[in-house]
Image: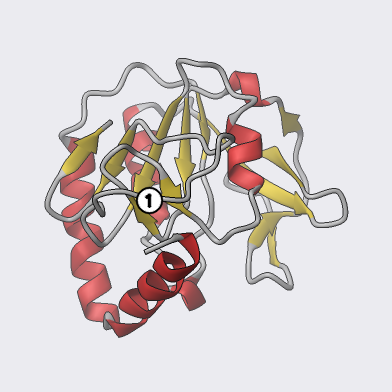
Amino acid sequence: MNKKQLREAYKAKRRELSEAQRMRMDDLMLIQFQTVSLPFLEYLFTYWPIEENHEPNTHIFTEFLRFRNPELKIAYPVIDTGSIEMNAIFTDVDTPFEKTSFNLFEPQIGEPIMPASFDLVFVPLLCVDKQGYRVGYGKGYYDKYLSQCRSDCLKIGFSYFDPVESIPDKADFDVPLDLCITPGAAYVF
């Protein structure tokens, strides 16, 4: 299957999961995530999961990292659809978020953080292959952003499903993940 076919197939697979199934899988992914040996993290770029898309609950992974390092600096994306750019905005517990027309919750205030600052980026995906390449929603925001991050910045995705063998139509500009956490394993690429 090509990216378009994988995108549709995995959207459908996620829609078939009940809320109870997703919550159980989120818990299992948190257990897998806790087994990963991570370096000391100062800056995390995460995202607010889109409930309508049945995305894994990234909040639990973010909170686990905040528990490990209360001084962790956390940023969320803000999308500029006009320029097809994504920026990272530093947040804290008082930062207000607002839902956009894309069903994204974005911080309404905060300071921008440069891509080179991040030690870890949580990357949304619909599916991933065994080489760490992913199928996202097809707009290219994350691949463009990740290409600006440091080479030692860890890129982690979360998926309810195991990797597919290969994504045949990956592009030269696609940036692979370093890890993908699933309910049954932590895949290292």
Q: Residue at x 36, y 81 (%)?
A: 15
Which one is in front, 140 or 93?
Answer: 140
- Secondary-structure class at tag 1: loop
Residue 165 visible here: yes
Q: Is residue 65 left or right of residue 152?
A: left
Front-lying residue, 159 or 100? 159
Residue underneath mark 1 = 167
Asked whether, in this view, residue 134 is left or right of residue 188, the answer is right
- Quarter holding residue 56: bottom left
- Quadrant into which the C terminus falls: top left
Q: Quadrant of residue 188?
A: top left
Placement of the N terminus among the 4 image quadrants: bottom left
Q: How would you rate the neighbour count of disc 1 (Cα within 10 Å): few for under 14, some for 14-19, many for 20 or more?
A: many
Residue 92 visible? The answer is no
Q: Nearer the viewer, residue 1 or 73?
A: 1
> Of 68 and 78, which appears nearest the observer?
78
- In the drawing, does residue 112 fall left or right of residue 152? right
For the point 37% across and 80% down, the residue is 12
Residue 119 vertical position relative to residue 88 in the rendered view, above or below: above
Q: Position of residue 51 (x, y in %)?
A: 47, 73
Q: How is the image coloured?
A: secondary structure
Q: Amino acid at mark 1?
A: Ile
Image point (55%, 24%), residue name: 118
**Residue at 54 percent of width and 42 percent of height:** 171
Q: Residue 159's spot in the image, x, y percent?
A: 31, 56
- In the displayed structure, 142 sits above or below 57; it is above
